[in-house]
Amino acid sequence: MSAPGPIEKAEGRGLPLRGDDIDTDRIIPARYLRCVTFEGIGEHAFEDDRKALADAAAGDPRARRHAFDDARFGGAAILIVNRNFGCGSSREHAPQALMRRGIRGIVGESFAEIFFGNCVALGIPCFTMPADAAKALQDAVETDPSIEITLDVRARALVAEVSGRTLPSAKATIPDGAREAFLSGVWDATGLLLQRPEEIEAVRRSLPYARLFA
């Protein structure tokens, strides 16, 4: 198994998802926690929210669609959120669903602590920025979905560009621990562990209770 590499940037077009306190049950409904693998879970991200809006919009082409169903943001890789995103349960399925939906980085006002940690473990940088700046970026992307966003881990900065022009933006940031993990390539603890199977086996053999079942 190859070593996890450093992550210096997350890049792509933006996907604005408005709302404070969006919890993990909305990101991925609890019925999908029974899945044995994470394959295909991305298609169920925000499934209930999306269905509710689609049902309400039935027959009205002008009605608002969920951002994940808005064709303007198809293929977007940078999720733009508001306050306390990812609150609720600690389910890893939430960032897994976002990652498998194509999200490579998230920027917003704040994140729930466990959700943030789960994102780091999956290689998804989460940047924070002031509330007014996050809303301004959402406005800008809704106006022009072609805007390209770069979350620069090393520089602790967000860069937004359209038609070769850099847009003014508040400086985003990422905590020291997460930044160091991404830059050094140690964000994938499981991957690092599995690179040393001989050490895992040695520890297993040293455990008295493991010898009982050998």
Image (spheres, rainbow, N blue to C red):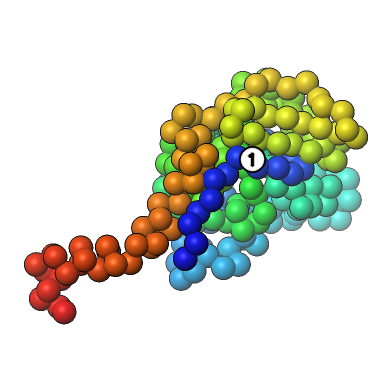
Image position, residue 69 (x, y; %): 76, 53
Residue name at image x 82 percent, y 27 percent: 166
Circle 1 is placed at which residue position? 9
Q: Which residue lies furthest to the bottom in this view?
A: 214
- Image location (x, y in percent) of residue 182: 51, 41
Q: Residue at x 86, y 55 (%)?
A: 59
| Residue 61 as seen in the image, left or right of residue 160 | right
> Is residue 57 in sight in this rendering?
no
Q: Is residue 130 above or below residue 62?
A: above
Asked if residue 214 lies left or right of residue 3, the reply is left
The quarter of the displayed image where residue 44 is located: bottom right
Numbered label tally:
1
Residue 12 place in picture, x, y as percent: 74, 44
Amino acid at dot 1: Lys
* Residue at x-position 43% and y-position 58%: 191
Closer to the camera, 27 or 9?
Answer: 9
Q: What element carries label 1?
A: strand
For the C terminus, the image quarter is bottom left
Question: Residue 19, position in %: x, y?
Answer: 63, 34
Q: How crowded is mark 1: few (under 14 residues within 10 Å), some or many (20 or more)?
A: many
**Residue 132 makes an appearance in the image:** yes
Pick whichever, 127 or 108, lies toward us.
127
Residue 132, compared with residue 49, is above or below; it is: above
In the visual, does 58 lie left or right of 90? right
